[in-house]
Amino acid sequence: MQARRPRQTQVEVRVLMTRLRGVSPIPLVLILLSAVAGCETDRDGVTVDVTSTVKAYQEYVDRQPDRAEVEAMIARMPAEQLNDLGVLYESEGRLEEAEWAYQQAVWRDPRYAQAYVNLGNVLRKLERPEEAMLRYRQAMAADPDSFVAVNNFADLCAAERTCIEEAIQRLSPMVARAGAQRPYALDTLGWLNCCLGEHEEALELLQAALQEAPQEDDLLRASIHSHLAEAYGSLGRQEEAEAHEAEARCIRQRLERDHPRPAGAEGE
């Protein structure tokens, strides 16, 4: 399964986003820039002064900036803030705008591996797997040690039934140093082996993944159960396959009930 992105800096604009829902990317960039200009920044991100931000938006409504002003303001925004803007858009289900923000981030910093991963994730949600594959490859080139880049590349390879051997070769050495992400690696490797027809090896990996997966990580556990169902089914063990498929379905139904997705959003 796709590994979740590590904790990133967060731009605290939930109230602002509610007020400005539907604003196009360029105006929102201008608003964020004006708000961030006098704010304190620390390792947890940027705290936005909502009053000054709303005032900035009102000023924007009164006077449309020309193209040169827009380009100058965007040029001042660092890649990390553009990436954070993409995270906000993605969390709201605004995938095309998230794509725009992540693209701006990698243009600003072509070695920013996390922005490439995030861009690949959004492109996958937009059902553009070939473009997503390219972005994951760019992430791996920017940071060959990025577990998230390698795992999400391998997960897409399994989903598309392509480059399976390459994906296994890239991901296998990372399992031992994956740390808390190890259950994700085992799940992805298990699925890759299932794609190759190595069902016994797949079962061993997937059972280990299920044993190590945190009980509270419902998305991961649903993914593992689904892949176990596929592996057992391929071996003709239908009773076990149906049991795991039923468990995966139960978890997903609970997630849909307890955490409805924003319009346009898809699961990772």
Image (spheres, rainbow, N blue to C red):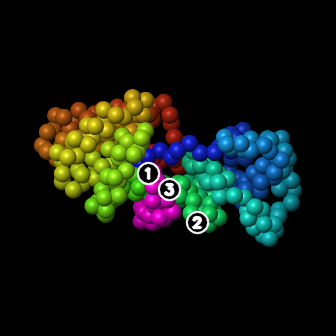
Query: In the image, which disc is placed on residue 117?
Result: 3
Identify which residue, 92 or 120, lies in the foreground. Answer: 120
Residue beneath label 1, please? 147
Task: Write the start and end of the magenta stretch as one range.
Answer: 128-149
The amino acid at mark 3 is Val
Residue beneath label 2, please? 110
Q: Secondary structure at mark 3?
A: helix
- Residue 102, located in which quarter of the rendered image? bottom right
Of labels 3 and 1, earlier in sequence is 3
Q: Nearer the viewer, mark 3 or mark 1?
A: 1
Query: Percent x, y for residue 183?
Result: 36, 40
Identify which residue, 262 or 187, lies in the foreground. Answer: 187
> Label 3: few (<14), some or many (≥20) within 10 Å?
many
Query: Percent x, y for residue 135?
Result: 48, 63
The amino acid at mark 1 is Phe
Query: Percent x, y for residue 38?
Result: 83, 47
Is 22 positioned to the left or the right of 246 in the image?
Answer: right
